[in-house]
Image: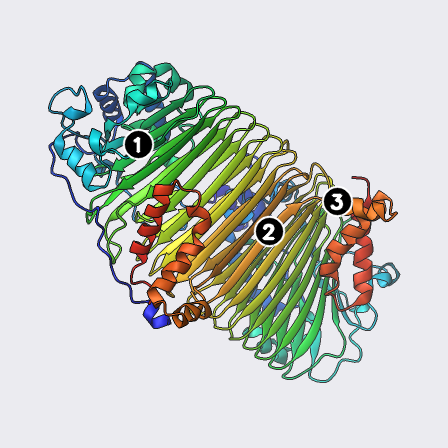
């Protein structure tokens, strides 16, 4: 078995094409003028310019983190294009006027944006390099007072909301990449759900990096007013380049009293080739603030792409009785590296959190779970349950677990368990005995291993995620 | 990293420090104050190596991952004097209650061997249980391949111990020797007028097929501030078995930083029971490396902290060959405003296929102000392994207390019973009933006082 396990077949990355489109790209490099230029290009209000400059100056004083168990050559931040947008033919009035090349691109990616082909009941914001190119179902959502648009648009139409919430959950000085993002972010999605509103459809953002030299720095902000509910999904792909592109995003969620936000990610950035050449550096800061009582934030992530993933979707449970959840599947193959996990910070009373993390490492990849559960001195009756399981396929893959547990309140209750194992040979044999091929058996067992997490994804995406996983693993076992 | 006045201090020219002591200064001060080696001049070379390693470093701060939660400011704020010669010659009658019956006993006071307190009578032939200072010149070469040869010497406190070494305990087991009774090492730190620093050391070499039970105990005489920086090296040849009981019950002013480094050959069994009760700061690092196949490591640990104590255990088990197994159960009880810390690392590189490792960490918080930081950690590259870890933090279960109350037990007894049950899982692994009983009593006293 062990020798056949190593037979890794490389399944082509089907999203690896490049769209040939004329784009408005600023020169490489980063300085205050570039920050101002990005801001000017987007015609931003003064407070944004100040915000960006503050972040940029902060970033200059910081060092990139060295604690994750990932290795990569130092990034030359002067060799990155910080703004690249498809050149608009003229001012867009409706979706029909979006450049057909772009529509085609997204169609090819399985994200139809045109009226007749839209996914039913999913509103999509499509982001291409640095800017949002289209947002579907905007008007329908607006009828209920829901705002779903690109963040640049929100800056013009709802500046007070942006000013109130931007940088509130992830302050500019939070970490190196968050500071960089705050200085140069170009676009992203903004969602605002008014009081007592149940968002009638899934909201979704699709990120696409096209330009080989540009980084993508998007920013997502979701505000759920008291009593509201929203389910949000993001997907991402990029073309195959030999070089590495930087993706440093920031996602901020705010849930007020009794509000619930479900945030799901299916991350399939280009992961580099079988020798670890190329791929996206995915350095993302995601954090949700359960500000109100009884609020709930749930993160679900399926991480299959990126050369390096560095990401810790977190929940700060401030409101009493608030709930944080984290469900994650991280699959690494070839030379991919993932250092991912979550932080659950319990501040309010009777707050609860659940962490389910499944890591699968194949080939020469390295997969780390790094998590923090912190129960503050005032978090009476806080409760956490964490489970991290790792599966190793091939004897060059690595799996690490670094769970930090910090409790400062005796009424807190924390349980953590972790295991690392391989696919059981007995179980495989049992399947084969029943006439199921080795490959199918392994794939079934892996999908069973991830079941707890896939169950949390919206239906269509659970199917997609399952398929994605089996594609990625094809030929790894058997 | 070092400022220039400190450098010149090293050269023997003392310059006044015009700024508050920093981590470097304090380490330097400890090094400048290192006790002269009088009785074992042959340790000179090792001390030089230690000095070189330590001089490159600083006392760790919260920015060092390994010391992130451990506040070393107590060490920085006090000026410690090294013990040049054993200062106190404890009256044996003060200590006799601590002697374990039917043991071979070596007693060290402030790192120096106290022959009048030790009892090595009835030693079987070939078996060496003595202090470095009692060795004859023909015996020195024995140690050359072992003393200070474990990995991790560059770690700052290990280097400090090496630089300041004056004496130590040596246990040398020839092949197939089975030591008939436990060996009791009693390291006493005196704490009277001025704060003293002591650097105890122990070297155990168990040659193939030998078996021994070692009890290593740290105690204080007096209630003052003291700094104890101990290192124990254990070398296990193929098929040997070592049962190692380590008890740290220094006074509540003491700073104790100790390390146990174990190297396990093929088919060996290392079982350790480590109990940490004392010190304003009590830190114990356990580093086990399985260098041979099919070895077994069993670690049991219990830390009980009260008042403002910080008790910290860092363990690491590294597997390097196939078929290794390990089992670890680490428990802690934290009361008052105390802080308990655990970091447990399991490292399984590619060569260590078929490893079976399990680790469980359980912490009981018995006071509203107590705090715990724990991090069980797995680093695995081999695919054909079974590794699990678990961690729980909680207070005593209300329902369990209620159940006992419903059976007629008053609350304090019910709590006592549950705490006893919690600690017994560790204490029961100590093969000396007398020691177990005395530890149980000490724990009860600590946990029982009003919380």
Q: Residue at x 88, y 61 (%)?
A: B93
> Residue B145 occupies which quadrant of the picture?
bottom right
- Location of mark 3 (residue): B399
Which structural element holds mark 3?
helix
Q: Chain of mark 1?
A: A
> Residue A126 occupies which quadrant of the picture?
top left
Instruction: Tell me the colour scheme of the image.
Output: rainbow
Please identify the quadrant where the C terminus of chain A is shown. bottom left
Could you confirm whether marks 3 and 1 are on the same chain?
Answer: no
- Location of mark 1 (residue): A218
Q: For this view, does A93 lie left or right of residue B40?
A: left
Q: Are marks 1 and 2 in contact (CB under 8 Å)?
A: no
Q: Is residue A99 visible?
A: yes
Please identify the quadrant where the N terminus of chain A is shown. bottom left
- Location of mark 2 (residue): B391
Q: Nearer the viewer, mark 3 or mark 1?
A: 3
Label 3, residues with CA under 10 Å away: few <14, some 14-19, many ≥20: few
Q: For this view, does B85 lie left or right of residue A240?
A: right
Q: Please provide percent x and percent y for residue A39.
A: 26, 21
Q: Residue at x 39, y 22 (%)?
A: A192
Q: Please provide percent x and percent y for residue B267.
A: 57, 77
């Amino acid at each position: 078995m062990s020798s056949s396990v190593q037979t890794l077949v490389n399944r082509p990355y089907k999203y690896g094409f490049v769209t040939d489109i004329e784009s408005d790209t600023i020169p490489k490099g980063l300085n205050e003028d570039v920050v101002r230029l990005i801001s000017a290009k987007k015609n931003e209000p003064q407070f944004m310019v100040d915000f960006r400059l503050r972040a940029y100056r902060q970033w200059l004083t910081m060092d990139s983190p060295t604690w994750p168990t990932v290795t990569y050559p130092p990034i030359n931040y002067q060799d990155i294009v910080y703004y690249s947008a498809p050149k608009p033919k003229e001012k867009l009035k409706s979706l029909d006027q979006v450049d057909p090349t772009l529509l085609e691109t997204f169609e090819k990616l399985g994200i139809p944006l045109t009226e007749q082909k839209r996914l039913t009941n999913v509103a999509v914001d499509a982001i291409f390099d640095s800017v949002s190119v289209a947002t579907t179902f905007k008007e329908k959502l607006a009828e209920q007072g829901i705002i779903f648009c690109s963040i640049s648009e929100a800056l013009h139409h709802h500046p007070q909301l942006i000013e109130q919430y931007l940088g509130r959950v992830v302050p500019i000085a939070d970490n190196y990449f968050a500071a960089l993002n705050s200085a140069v972010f170009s676009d992203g999605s903004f969602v605002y759900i008014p009081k007592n509103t149940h968002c009638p459809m899934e909201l979704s953002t699709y990120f696409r990096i096209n330009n080989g030299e540009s980084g993508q720095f998007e920013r997502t902000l979701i505000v759920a007013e008291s009593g509201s509910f929203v389910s949000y999904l993001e997907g991402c792909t990029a073309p195959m380049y030999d070089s590495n592109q930087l993706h440093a995003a920031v996602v901020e969620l705010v849930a007020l009293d009794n509000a619930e936000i479900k945030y799901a990610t299916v991350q399939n950035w280009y992961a580099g080739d079988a020798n670890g050449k190329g791929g996206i550096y995915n350095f993302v800061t995601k954090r949700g603030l359960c500000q109100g009582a009884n609020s709930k934030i749930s993160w679900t992530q399926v991480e299959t792409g990126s050369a390096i993933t560095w990401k810790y979707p977190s929940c700060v449970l401030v409101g009493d009785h608030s709930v944080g959840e984290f469900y994650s599947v991280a699959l690494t193959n070839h030379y991919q590296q993932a250092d991912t996990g979550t932080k659950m910070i319990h501040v309010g009373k009777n707050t609860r959190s659940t962490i389910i993390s499944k890591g699968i490492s194949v080939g020469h990849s390295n997969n780390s779970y790094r998590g923090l559960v912190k129960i503050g001195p005032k978090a009476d009756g806080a409760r956490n349950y964490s489970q991290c399981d790792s599966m190793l396929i091939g004897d060059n893959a690595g799996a690490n677990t670094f769970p930090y547990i910090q409790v400062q309140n005796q009424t807190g209750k924390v349980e953590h368990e972790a295991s690392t194992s391989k696919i059981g040979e007995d179980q495989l044999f049992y399947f084969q005995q029943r006439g199921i091929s080795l490959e199918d058996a392994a794939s079934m067992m892996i999908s069973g291993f991830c079941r707890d997490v896939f169950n949390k994804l919206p239906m269509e995406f659970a199917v997609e995620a399952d398929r994605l996983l089996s594609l990625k693993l094809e030929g790894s076992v058997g | 990293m070092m400022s220039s006045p400190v450098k010149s201090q090293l050269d023997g020219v003392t310059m006044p420090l015009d700024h508050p002591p920093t981590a470097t200064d304090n380490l330097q001060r400890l090094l400048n104050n290192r006790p002269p080696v009088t009785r074992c001049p042959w340790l000179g070379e090792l001390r030089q190596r230690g000095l070189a390693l330590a001089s490159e470093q600083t006392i760790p701060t919260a920015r060092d991952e390994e010391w992130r939660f451990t506040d070393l400011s107590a060490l920085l704020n006090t000026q410690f004097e090294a013990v040049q010669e054993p200062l106190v010659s404890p009256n044996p009658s003060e200590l006799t209650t601590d002697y374990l019956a039917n043991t071979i006993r070596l007693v060290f006071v402030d790192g120096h061997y106290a022959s009048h307190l030790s009892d090595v009578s009835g030693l079987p032939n070939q078996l060496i249980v003595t202090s470095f200072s009692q060795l004859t010149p023909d015996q020195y070469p024995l140690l050359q391949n072992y003393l200070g040869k474990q990995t991790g010497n560059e770690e700052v406190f290990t280097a400090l111990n090496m630089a300041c070494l004056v004496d130590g305990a040596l246990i040398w087991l020839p092949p197939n020797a089975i030591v008939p009774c436990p060996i009791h090492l009693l390291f006493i730190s005196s704490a009277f007028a001025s704060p003293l620093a002591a650097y105890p050391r122990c070297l155990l070499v168990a040659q193939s097929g030998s078996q021994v039970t070692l009890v290593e105990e740290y105690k204080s005489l007096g209630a003052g501030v003291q700094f104890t920086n101990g290192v124990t090296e254990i070398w296990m040849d193929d098929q040997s078995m070592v049962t190692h009981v380590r008890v740290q019950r220094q006074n509540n002013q003491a700073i104790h930083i100790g390390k146990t480094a174990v190297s396990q050959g093929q088919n060996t069994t290392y079982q350790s029971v480590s109990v940490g009760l004392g010190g304003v700061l009590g830190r114990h690092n356990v580093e086990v490396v399985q260098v041979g196949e099919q070895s077994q490591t069993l670690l049991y640990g219990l830390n009980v902290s009260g008042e403002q104590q910080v008790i910290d255990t860092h363990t690491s088990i590294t597997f390097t060959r196939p078929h290794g197994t390990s089992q670890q159960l680490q428990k802690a009880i934290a009361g008052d405003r105390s802080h308990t810390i655990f970091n447990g690392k399991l490292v399984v590189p590619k060569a260590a296929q078929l490893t079976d490792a399990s680790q469980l960490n359980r912490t009981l918080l018995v006071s509203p102000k107590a705090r715990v930081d724990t991090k069980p950690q797995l680093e695995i590259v081999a695919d054909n392994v079974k590794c699990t870890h678990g961690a729980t933090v909680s207070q005593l279960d209300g329902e369990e207390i209620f159940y006992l109350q419903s059976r007629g037990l008053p609350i304090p007894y019910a709590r006592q019973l549950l705490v006893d049950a919690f600690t017994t899982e560790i204490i029961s692994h100590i093969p000396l009933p007398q020691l177990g009983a005395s530890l149980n009593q000490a724990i009860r006293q600590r946990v029982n006082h009003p919380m």
